[in-house]
Amino acid sequence: MAKLIDGKALAEKIQGQLAHKVAELKAEHGIVPGLVVILVGDNSASQVYVRNKERSALAAGFKSETVRLSDSTSEEELLNIIEHYNQDSAFHGILVQLPLPAHINDKRILLAIDPKKDVDGFHPMNTGHLWNGRPQMVPCTPAGIMEMLHEYEVDLEGKHAVIIGRSNIVGKPMAQLLLDKNATVTLTHSRTRSLPEVAKQGDVLIVAIGQGHFVTKEFVKEGAVVIDVGMNRDEDGKLIGDVKFDEVEPIASLITPVPGGVGPMTITMLMEQTYQAALRSVTKYDY
Ligand code: NDP
């Protein structure tokens, strides 16, 4: 039977520490971390994510601003707003909530964000730093997973980590972070052959595909550490992961639940990175 990785409890612990660090930053340097979240359109899931980010930023003692724009906002208007916040020293983090409406080129938008304020870690410059083994701003979900593995003392040195899903947001940056810890990494995707056999080689198995209960016990090595990133709704509207928890939990050594696993850590890392950006702004950090 596996031990649960409690992402909610760890997120609360890190947020508590963060509140102290924010108070210290204010006392020593007179600055408060500032986060602006820009939402274009009325996607209901995005609205929930943005509200949660706003709430967490305020709870951490940040200056928090949300810019809500209509669906008809043009790319040029959005670029102008980003440039305004790039120049505004009261804001250390800029996040543009994805997905954007189809008429806006999201690659152009992400490129426009000052890499020093790119708290989502999606700017190609930050991707480059990550691949060069000098991570600065790292996509928040893999960053949160690394915190969880550290907290639960998972030794990655020489271990085989298998990732299912190769998105820019989760799978790819996850691979590099695990390589940095000297794991041997296999990054799999929808065209991978014999996926259950490949996955079953993983001492650590990280699943981020977006298909509810896809990973059954046939994919999991006895004693593996299983991290479930997936967030899906079942036919009753209940939130479920990509891993069939009831089947996998008895053979894993450590496993994240859904909800209460990876999700709370993602938003916590966003706050931590905004704090780090604010800290760098006063410590003459060589970016
Ligand atoms: P994407 O849709 O961007 O990527 C999905 C990846 O999974 C792709 O690489 C795809 O392969 C692969 N894939 C899809 N189906 C299969 C399959 N049957 N077998 C093997 N690989 C497959 O998704 P995201 O990475 O953005 O998100 C994945 C999941 O994680 C979603 O449920 C999302 O909601 C959740 N999520 C949760 C977060 C959290 O904070 N908890 C944060 C971010 C995401 P290919 O490249 O070949 O198409």
Image (cartoon, rainbow, N blue to C red):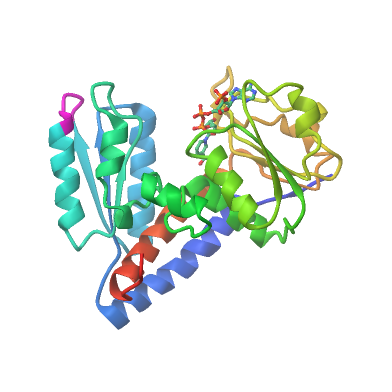
Q: Which residue sits at x=15%, y=28%? A: 74
Eyeballing the image, is 53 above or below 46?
below
| Observer able to see residue 261 | no
User: Residue 53's spot in the image, x, y percent?
Assistant: 37, 48
User: Does residue 71 belong to the magenta stretch?
Assistant: yes
Q: Which residue sits at x=51%, y=33%? A: 167
| Ligand 1, image quadrant it occupies | top right
Is residue 29 or residue 63 the one in the foreground? Answer: 29
Can you name the residue that lies furthest to the bottom here?
28
| Observer able to see residue 105 | yes
Q: Say which quarter of the image contains residue 136.
A: bottom left
User: Residue 275's spot in the image, x, y percent?
Assistant: 37, 64
Is residue 253 or residue 58 the one in the foreground? Answer: 253
Q: Is residue 60 left or right of residue 17?
A: left
The quadrant of the image that shows the C terminus is bottom left
Q: Which residues are magenta?
A: 70-75
Is residue 256 or residue 234 the one in the foreground? Answer: 256
User: Residue 280's spot in the image, x, y percent?
Assistant: 34, 69
- Specify the principal SS of the magenta part: loop
Q: Is residue 214 left or right of residue 238?
A: right
Q: Say which quarter of the image contains residue 27.
A: bottom left
Q: Is residue 40 left or right of residue 52?
A: left
Q: Which residue sits at x=57%, y=38%? A: 171
Q: Which residue sits at x=29%, y=42%? A: 111
User: Does residue 215 belong to the magenta stretch?
Assistant: no
User: Residue 55's spot in the image, x, y percent?
Assistant: 35, 51
Can you name the residue that lies furthest to the top here?
235
